[in-house]
Amino acid sequence: MAADAHDAHEDHGPRPVLAEGQRWETDPPLRKAMSGIRDDVAKNLPAYHDSRLQAADAEALAASVEDNVNYMIANCQLEPEPDAVLHVMIGEMMGAATALREDPASTEGVPRLVSVVNDYEATFDHEELEPLTHD
């Protein structure tokens, strides 16, 4: 699986940083994959908040994250600096997918995905992506 090459991306050292208010460029494959992840997380947030996220739904969300990450890895063509930032996020998303499979109620699953999606939205130029709220 293409994502296996990114499993160790939890710790890449310091991330490249842009000036305040600037965001990294994106490409269509990245926007497509992150929109898919964001939409699937949003769809599962109410059940997570109500402590009723079922194992099958958590598995489907984890599979969606992995599928979108694999698509991203295979198709994105970013410059090296934003790619390095994205690789850290990929590691976080893959860790969240693993946590979802182990325990749908884990704080390392859905909440971690919300955090990554919102970090992505603040860091990358993806205008149509709305941040997620996680109360």
Image (cartoon, rainbow, N blue to C red):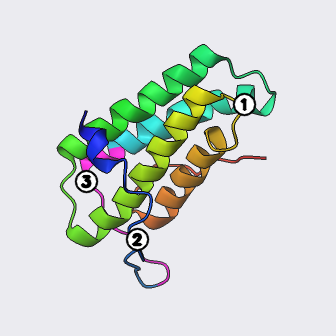
Give the numbered dot on residue 48: 1
Residue 127 in sight: no
Q: Residue at x 63, y 18 (%)?
A: 55
Q: Residue at x 40, y 62 (%)?
A: 124
Relative placement, left or right, of 111 versus 7 is: right
Instruction: Determine whether label 2 and label 3 are within 8 Å by CB.
Output: no
Residue 98 shown in magenta: no
Q: Residues within 10 Å of mark 3 (few under 14, many from 20)?
A: some
Q: Which secondary structure dominates the residues rendered in magenta?
A: loop
Instruction: Decide which of tag 2 and tag 1 comes sooner along the chain.
Output: 2
Measured Cα–Cα span from mark 3 to mark 1: 31 Å
Q: Select label 3 or label 1 by which is in front.
A: 1
Q: Which residue is mark 2?
A: 23
Q: Relative to 15, does residue 50 appear above or below in the rendering?
A: above
Residue 41 in sight: yes
Q: Relative to 57, does residue 13 appear above or below in the rendering?
A: below
Q: Which residue is mark 3?
A: 27
Measured Cα–Cα span from mark 2 to mark 3: 13 Å
Measured Cα–Cα span from mark 2 to mark 1: 30 Å
Relative placement, left or right, of 72 versus 20 is: left
Q: Amino acid at mark 1?
A: Tyr
Where the N terminus falls, by quadrant? Answer: top left
Q: Relative to 43, does residue 6 appear above or below in the rendering?
A: below
Q: Residue at x 18, y 55 (%)?
A: 77
Query: Residue 42 appears at what percent x and percent y?
Result: 60, 35
Q: Residues within 10 Å of mark 1 (few under 14, many from 20)?
A: many
Residue 26 shown in magenta: yes
Question: Which stretch appears magenta?
Answer: 20-31
Front-most of residues 59 and 64 = 59
